[in-house]
Image (cartoon, rainbow, N blue to C red):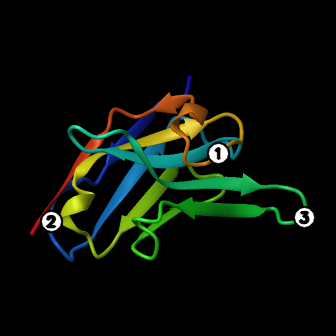
Amino acid sequence: QVLLVESGGGSVQAGGSLELSCTTSDKTDSLNFAWFRQAPGTEREGVAAIYWRGGLRRRYESTYADSVKARFTISREKGENTVYLQMNSLKPEDTAMYYCAAALRGGAPLDDSQYDYWGPGIQVTVSS
């Protein structure tokens, strides 16, 4: 069982920045991570994912939803138990509950059905 806890949420004005952190109980590099969000009345949306690319590349790679590209950055340090989501140029439409998720296996990075463990979520509110 992997435990995930999000932190760093809150309220900010449009154009501002927040950094979310996801602390895990697992320090291994075998897990893939992602951030999802869900606003009231909407489906959960994949925001950003980071995963280990083995083989010749042997590095972390990331992928983003079109709506957050060039504004959000997901990161982690190899061997560390924290995953970050830096959110810049925030917009009111970024307002949602944000969830950290971890997957035991690879798959479609922004598909929530791929993920095995979830944090309780943290609120992000962006005012205009």
Q: Residue at x 67, y 63 (%)?
A: 61
> Which amino acid is tagged 2?
Val
Quadrant in which residue 115 is drawn:
top right
The quadrant where residue 111 appears: top right
Give the labeled residue for mark 2: 12
Q: Residues within 10 Å of mark 2 (few under 14, many from 20)?
A: some
Q: Secondary structure at mark 1?
A: loop
Q: Position of residue 20 (x, y in %)?
A: 35, 56
Q: Residue at x 67, y 42 (%)?
A: 28
Residue 56, numbered circle? 3
Residue found at the far top of this picture: 1
Q: CA distance from mark 3 to mark 2?
A: 41 Å
Q: Is residue 18 above or below residue 122?
A: below
Asked if the residue under mark 1 is in contact with the one under mark 3, i.e. CB atoms within 8 Å, the reply is: no
Pair 3/1: label in front: 1
The residue type indicated by label 3 comes to: Leu
Which residue type does callout 1 highlight? Answer: Ala
Q: Is residue 50 above or below residue 116?
A: below
Query: Callout 2: helix, strand or loop?
Result: strand
Among all residues in the image, which is located at the extreme left?
128
Q: Position of residue 80 (x, y in %)?
A: 58, 52
